[in-house]
Amino acid sequence: MRSIVITGVSTGIGHATAKLLLARGFRVFGSVRRQADAERLQAEFGANFIPLLFDVTDEAAVLAAAAQVRAALNGETLAGLVNNAGVAVPGALLDLAVDEFRQQIEINVMGPVIVTKAFAPLLCADPAMTGAPGRIVMMSSVSGQFGNPLLSPYSASKFALEGLAESLRREFMLFGIEVLVIAPGAVRTPIWDKAEAIDMARFDASPFVPALTKLREMLMKLAKNGLPPERIGELVYRALTASRPKLRVVASPQPAKALARSHYGEAVGAECATV
């Protein structure tokens, strides 16, 4: 049975991807931050789902989880690692505390760095493992190519993630490990549901208040009208199993060229496919 590690499976894309891969015969190790979520998902998904309890920024906890997975693999390689966990910090740069920006980078960039370093040996970077090399899927965003105002921490984190993936793709060729990127646009996930809970009072003195109000409304709309997370789960499955997977896939209700025009006024070339 092929085994996959997915970070951030309590809700949204991670949950949908875990469910789909389990239905297609994979064993899934899924990370959550709360014991209650681990117990809930274990009951929902059954014996082939193994919860891993860690925050992606906690290196000691991630390394402990990697040791747990290594023991379960019994010498066989891990088939895939899906770096999915992430958050979105909205707001104008001048209105945000430096620590808020730092938290965004810690979770969305340093998190995948920590997780990838911990689990890459199991994908075949450790010659003691036997079997075919695994693959790494980085969950980026259309914001990884197009910088959005009032979402600069999120855009910066996804630009960084794309650069990380591009570099690691070449480094990991040494081990036969492929590094792939999926870049969703609007997806119906709880990451955007939190827009309704944004405390607008803290921005009362900001010159960006009208724009922030529109952003909040837009994010709430994204939470309702985006792609179903199951569509992204299907793309993850293809990335993990296709004989010749695409290096970068854009998953958006808008065609890739329309996305480019909306940001730059003209189409730009991209190595991607749109669903």
Image (cartoon, grey):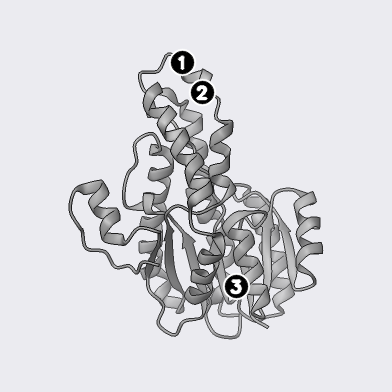
Count residues near mark 2 (Cα–Cα under 10 Å), then give few for <14, some for 14-19, many for 20+. few
Q: Residue furthest top?
A: 205
Disc 3 versus disc 2: distance between alpha carbons?
45 Å
Mark 3 element type: helix
| Tag of residue 204 | 1
| Amino acid type of the residue that numbered disc 2 sits on in the rendered structure | Met
Pick whichever of labels 3 and 2 is earlier in the sequence. Answer: 3
Foreground label between 1 and 3: 1
Do tag 1 and tag 2 residues touch (Cβ < 8 Å)?
yes
| Amino acid type of the residue that numbered disc 3 sits on in the rendered structure | Leu
Residue 186 point in image, percent of width and height:
45, 52
Foreground label between 3 and 2: 2
Q: Say which residue label 3 marks.
A: 122
Disc 1 versus disc 3: distance between alpha carbons?
50 Å
Mark 2 element type: helix
Q: Is residue 84 left or right of residue 174?
A: right
Which residue is located at x 56 percent, y 65 percent? 230
| Amino acid type of the residue that numbered disc 1 sits on in the rendered structure | Asp
Which residue is located at x 67 percent, y 76 percent? 23
Which residue is located at x 48 percent, y 43 percent? 221
Residue 159 point in image, percent of width and height:
36, 50
| Tag of residue 164 | none
Q: Say which residue label 2 marks.
A: 200
Quadrant holding the N terminus: bottom right
